[in-house]
Amino acid sequence: MDALLKETVDAAINSRYPDMAPEGRRLIEEILIRKEVEKGALLLNEGQISHNIVFVGKGMLRQFYYKNGKDVTEHFSYEGCIIICIESTLKQEPTHLMIEALESSVVYLLPYNKLLTLTEISWEINMFYRKILEYSLIVSQIKADSWRFEAARERYNQFMEHQPEVIKRAPLSHIASYLLMTPETLSRVRSGIL
């Protein structure tokens, strides 16, 4: 058995539904597809349909999109995180989001159609799926509220508190775009000028 697979499944499940029994975890492990992604490679490109929920086993990825010719980071994910392009996955329509490896990474793809089949036979898998969706909605709401109500310094402080791993590993240009700042503004915030 792949030790990284078990570790990744446990981390991903524990982050959303820690009460899941070993049998449910095994069902998920059995349908995951391991994929190695080189740094800079796209796991999902604009215009593609997202057929998978992604568990990050090793490395760091980001979801991003283009707006007015600039790339805007939507989300960062690293070991133990789950990535889902909600609209594309649920509607099975082309996405505007892209997923890029910021480091050489190992991910596990959870095919959405197989997950749905499991939700019909396992209450626990159904709960886990629900928790993934709930968590994604909450994160989206928190981020939208941050953009609406917080000043640049507040956004940065919240980010440092809740995502210290990203501060250590992601390029500052991506962190700036995630926080809806220019790199210059981020630099001023970091140096205490703003």
Image (cartoon, rainbow, N blue to C red):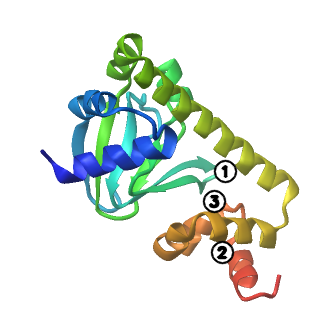
* Residue highlighted by disc 3: 178
* Badge 2 or badge 1: first in the primary sequence: 1
Q: Position of residue 61 (x, y in %)?
A: 42, 56
* Residue highlighted by disc 2: 183
Q: Is mark 2 in CB contact (under 8 Å) with mark 3?
A: no
Q: The residue tagged with tag 1: helix, strand or loop?
A: loop
Q: CA distance from mark 2 to mark 3?
A: 11 Å
Look at the image and tell me whether residue 44 can be seen: no
* Badge 2 or badge 3: first in the primary sequence: 3
Q: CA distance from mark 2 to mark 1?
A: 17 Å
Instruction: Return the residue found at the far top.
Output: 120
Q: Nearer the viewer, residue 43 or 27?
A: 27
Q: Position of residue 78 (x, y in %)?
A: 42, 58
Tell me the mark number nearer the camera, choosing from 2 and 3. 3
* Residue highlighted by disc 1: 68
User: In the figure, 133 relative to 10: above or below?
Assistant: above
Q: Position of residue 52 (x, y in %)?
A: 37, 31
Q: CA distance from mark 3 to mark 1?
A: 15 Å
* Badge 3 or badge 1: first in the primary sequence: 1
Tell me the mark number nearer the camera, choosing from 3 and 1. 3
* Residue at the image point whose x is 66% and y is 50% from the top: 68
Please tell me in which quadrant of the rendered image residue 150 appears.
bottom right
| Relative horizontal placement of residue 180, taking residue 83 as reference (left or right) | right
* Residue at the image point whose x is 52% and y is 34% from the top: 132
User: In the figure, 136 relative to 101: above or below?
Assistant: above
Point out the image quarter for the N terminus.
Answer: top left
Q: Nearer the viewer, residue 173 or 162?
A: 162
